Image: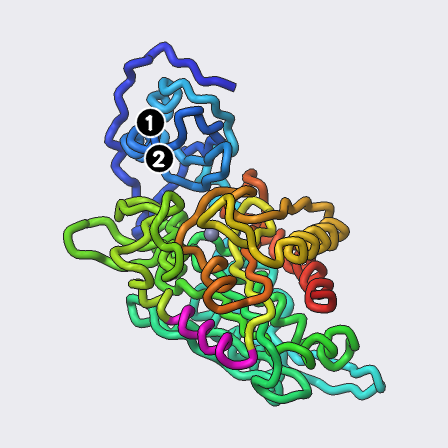
Amino acid sequence: MRFFSSLLLAAPLAAAVLLDRNGKIVYDGYKVFRVNTPEEGIAALDAQIAELEGIDVHRHADHFDVAIPPANLEAFGALNLDAQVLSEDLGELIAGEGEIAEYEGTTSMRLSSEDGEVSAAALPSLSWFSAYHAYDAHLTFLRDLQGAFPSNSEIITAGTSVQGRTITGIHLWGSGGKGSKPAIYFNGNVHAREWITSKVAEYLAYQLVVNYNNDTAVKAVLDKYDFYILPIVNPDGFVYTQTTDRLWRKNRQTRSGTSAVGTDINRNWPYQWVGSGSSTSPSSETYRGVAAGDTPENTGIRKFGDTLAAGKGIKLYIDWHSYGQYILFPYGYSCSAQVSNYSKQQSLAQSVASQIRSLYSKSFTYGPICTTLYAANGGSTDYMQDVAKTELAWTIELRDTGSYGFNLPASQILQSGQEQWKGQLWLWQNM
Ligand SMILES: [Zn+2]
C-alpha cells in the first residue's frame, strides 16, 4: 500500500530518544515498515530516512525494512513510499521476547550409549533454549557444556574485543583426538542484535555433546571433523543490546574525527573490502572501517580462521545471522564472479533447505549472496572461500522473514535450533 498524508510538508521532528529508568532506549510506538526500493535505488532515500531518525533494520535486493519513531510517522507517510507495515509497535515485539532469564545451571542427565552403558553427566538444562540470557550466562553455559564432555572438548578463544572481552567458544573433537581432522568453523552473533544466532550455534554444540555417545550418525560426524564454535564474536555489541539499545548491530569502536560509534565487523574482512556493498560513513549500519581488518574482533576471528586453514584445513564455515531465512554462499562482493564449486554449493544448500523445511515447514531461500540478497563487501564468507580456501563458506540467515525480525520470541528458539540441527546433520554427513 502507499501512504498518503494530508500534511505533505509535515516536517520531521527531532524525536529525542526516550530512555527508561535503566537507561535503555524505549522503542514503544516505533513502527517497522517494509519499503519496496524505488527505481532510483535506496541511496536516494538514505538522507531522508536519516532525517526521520529511521533505523536501518534490514536490506534486501528489492526492498528494505526500516523502523520509524512515533513522532515522525506522519512525515514518513508524506514521503509517499511504496511501503507496508511489518510491525505496528516495535516496543511490543521487544517485550514479547521475554525477560533476560537467569541461567538455571546444570542438571544431571542420563546418557546411554548404544551398547547400553549408562552414564550421568551434569549438563546445562534444556531450558537454556527457552529464554534469552545475559552475556556472562553464555560464558557459564559454554564452560558447563565443556565440563560435561571433558575428554573431547575445550574452551577456545579468538582474540579480544574493543572493550577487552575475550571472544570465547568451544572446540569439540572425536575419536581421532584434538585437532586431528578438518575443521567445521561457526561464528555467531557478529551482528549484535541477532540474538537467535548465538542460541542456535549453542544448540548445535549441545546436540553434538549430548548425542556423541548414543547416536552413531553423530559419532561418525564428530569423529570426522573438529568443530570450532564461537557463539558470540561481537561481545561488546551483544552486551550493549541488553543494557542500552536492543537494535544495535555493529561493534563499539570509537574513531577519531566522528562521534559515530561502531564498525560493521562483517564488512571489515581484509578481502574485497572496498565496494558498493559497504559504507564509508561511520554512522552507517554497514560502515566498513578506516582500513581493512581494523576492528579487533575481526582480527581475532580472522587469525583464528587462518590458523585452522593452515592446519587441517576448513571444510565448512558458517557465519550465523538473522533474519530472512536464507542459505547463502559466495560471492557477496560481485554478482558476476562465481565460486569454482558453484554446483556443489548450490545443490548442498538446496538439500539443507529441504531438510530444514521438512521439520516445521519454514522455507529458506538459497543461492549466492550478491544475486540472492544484496552486494556485500568485506564479508566473512568471501574471505573464507578465497583466502582461507574453505570448501563451503556460508552465511545462514535464521528465522523469521520479518514479522518479528530480530525480536524472535523466546518460544521459537528451540524450534529454530531443531530445524538447523536437522539441516546441519544432513550436511555434515553428505558434504
Ligand atoms: Zn547479520
Q: CA distance from mark 2 to mark 1?
A: 9 Å
Q: Is residue 174 above or below residue 55?
A: below
Q: Which residue is painted at 29% across and 67% down in the image? A: 163
Mark 1 Cα shell of 10 Å, populated few (<14), some (14-19), many (≥20): many
Left or right: 200 as drawn, with respect to 238: right
Q: Position of residue 119 (x, y in %)?
A: 74, 87
Taking depth in this image into account, of 185 and 271 the one nearest to the observer is 271
Q: Which residues are magenta?
A: 300-312
Q: Position of residue 222 (x, y in %)?
A: 67, 78
Magenta stretch holds residue 301: yes
Q: Which residue is painted at 60% across and 74% down in the image? A: 124
Does the rendering let one see residue 407? no
Q: Which mark is residue 423?
A: none
**Contact (Cβ within 8 Å) of mark 2 with mark 1:** yes
Q: Is residue 48 above or below residue 241?
A: above
Assess mark 1: CB under 8 A from ligand 1?
A: no
Left or right: 190 as drawn, with respect to 224: left
Task: Name the residue carrying label 1.
Answer: 72
Q: Nearer the viewer, mark 2 or mark 1?
A: 2
Taking depth in this image into account, of 62 and 25 the one nearest to the observer is 62
- Quadrant containing the C terminus is bottom right
Query: Nearer the N terminus, badge 2 or badge 1?
Result: 2
Q: Main secondary structure of the magenta part?
A: helix
Q: Which residue is painted at 54% across and 74% down in the image? A: 228
